[in-house]
Amino acid sequence: MKFDDKLDKQVKKITDLLKFKNKSYGNSALEPANIFSQANAIDSLSARIDDKLMRIKNKGIYDATEDTVKDLIGYLLLLLMAIEERESKIKNESKTSFANSTLQI
């Protein structure tokens, strides 16, 4: 099997896992419910990533109770999405703020 095919296969597994969990839990990773914690998406995802890294540190990569590596990759992808979303909002707010200040001149 070629590298590209192997990569596509692994990426599809992670994508399928994220989509399945999103159906089960809703979009809670990128839109936290903030029922108990008031953390934003980036902080919440960072905490989940810390938990996964701690599990790997304590139990190793081959922990039979869950697929920690796939979960970690999924959380890192979600973190990337959250960071890009935040940057996009900041950019849009800057444009809006600039447009409003230009109109007031």
Image: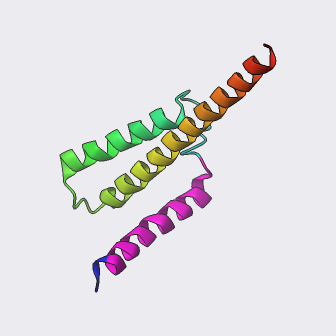
**Left or right: 86 in relation to 75:** right
Q: Quadrant of residue 38?
A: top right
Is the residue 99 above or below the residue 45 in the image?
above
In the rendered view of the protein, which quadrant contains the C terminus? top right
How many badges with numbers are in the image?
0
Q: Nearer the viewer, residue 84 or 27?
A: 84
Tell me where the magenta segment starts and ends, as one range: 4-27
Q: Could you tell whether 66 is left or right of 41 in the image?
A: left
Q: Residue furthest bottom?
A: 1
- Position of 98 with respect to 55 (left or right) is right
Q: Position of residue 18 (x, y in %)?
A: 50, 60
Magenta span contains residue 18? yes
Coloring scheme used: rainbow
> Farthest front residue?
105
Residue 69 on the magenta segment = no
Q: Is residue 96 left or right of residue 26?
A: right
Vertical relation: 70 (above or below) 41: below
| Residue 92 in picture, x, y percent from top left | 65, 34
Residue 60, compared with residue 93, is above or below; it is below
x%, y% of residue 66? 34, 60
Q: Is residue 1 above or below residue 80?
A: below
The answer, for residue 34, to whether it is visible in the render is no
Residue at image location 46% in from the left, 33% down from the top = 43
Which of the image's four quarters has the N terminus? Answer: bottom left
Which quadrant of the view contains residue 96?
top right
- Residue at x-position 28% and y-position 45%: 53
Inspect this view and state whether residue 51 appears: yes
Identify the residue at horizontal 54%, vertical 32% (top origin).
40
Which secondary structure class fits the magenta region best? Answer: helix
